[in-house]
Image: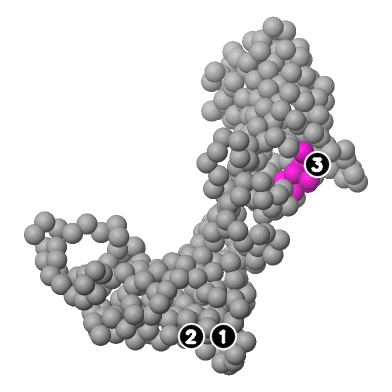
Amino acid sequence: MIYSPDTVPQYLASAASLIETVRLGNVFGGRPSFHLLGGETHSVQHLDLHSVAIHWDRSSFRKLKSLKLQGHVGESMTTDLFLEVLANNPSLEILKVTDLEIQLSETPSPPTIRLLQLRSMELKSLGFSALDHLLRHIEAPHCQEISIQGDYTPEFEELHKKNGSSKFYAGPFVTRWRSLGNSDDSPRFDVHVYYAPFASSLRWVERVLENLDQEGLEVTLDLDGGIGDPELMSTLRRLRCVTDICTSNPENSRGIMDVLSDPSVPSSQNAVPLLPSLRRLSVSYAHVTAEEILHMVRIRFAKSLHTTLKVHDLEISPSNRRAIWPMPSRIFNFATITEIRSIDGVTLNMYNRSSTPKEGELAVVWDEEKGGPTWGR
């Protein structure tokens, strides 16, 4: 139902004790708060408010199964009041709250709210202090889908263990941590951190990874932002769980080669290769040479022979992003390509897997069975 500024408030303020579902959206804005259904809301099971301000009584709702709030939905919404509303509705199954400013209460130790029926929870744009406070005082052991915008982690560390797998993506504009489980019985979560400085995002990723089992973990870094920050580079060198790195940035393509070649660490029998879990590397071939790639893989795979921590096999591919300006492709020396591919554990792809050959197009391709070049389409 669309909230009308003239007639609907009077109608909705009237007592209607049998109504079970209320869905209201206010596209006009600026309406004062009112007592929903004259305060007789004990029968309401589904409440969905979008920028509709009501008076919140701590005991107004008792049978809610779904609660969806977006925008301004009432005066003086605090964490204490919000937790009391949840406590009065133990049968709640769906909770979705977005773009709602919740004031942090000063209560030193509010009780923990257990929602045993909750199966889906989404909390976004509430203010980080309020979000952290609420998540620390809500227990939902059977919740299958959790989506938040923030950097809270302890609950998801446990969910990662139960789920068996999860994936990090850290890029210039968003950092995301989500579960990979496909089973309906597996708990799922999705955490977003938007527009944080990339160095800060990496520190958060590092902090979470310290407490996670690497089994079933995927970590992708999108380095299209600058990596010249010394603090960022220092964090990058400590991340041993990174599985994928991609960049089409010219400086970063060269920079990541330097990082993986590890020029700053003296050669020793106990030297550990940087980013030992790295499995896939995507860089701009227009900005690196075949000789640079060969130098990197020689050092990387030679060091793994002298330590108990072996590096994973590495697949190297061209970045799948096209430059916004015309850029001629670099022609790699074929002998160097052959030498790179001869190193055990290294796969070098010269073309994007996503690119589709044109009809009738001829090219010299590598025949894996013959172990040499051949004409192909």
Q: Which residue is mark 1?
A: 306
User: Which quarter of the figure is the C terminus placed in?
Assistant: bottom left
> Image quadrant of residue 257?
bottom left
Q: Is residue 220 left or right of residue 127?
A: left
> Contact (CB < 8 A) between labels 2 and 1?
yes
- Residue 237 on image: x %, y %: 59, 77
Q: Position of residue 169 (x, y in %)?
A: 53, 58
Q: Residue at (82%, 22%) from the top-left corner? A: 59
Whether residue 96 appears in this view of the structure is: no
Q: Magenta region: which residues?
A: 130-139
Quick one: label 1 or label 3, which is nearer the N terminus? Answer: 3
Near-viewer residue (212 or 109): 212
| Residue named by callout 2 | 302
Q: What's the amino acid at mark 2?
A: Ala
Percent across and percent down for residue 100 are 66, 39
Q: CA distance from mark 2 to mark 3?
A: 50 Å
Residue 73 placement, left or right of 23: right
Write down the residue under mark 3: 137
Q: CA distance from mark 1 to mark 3?
A: 49 Å
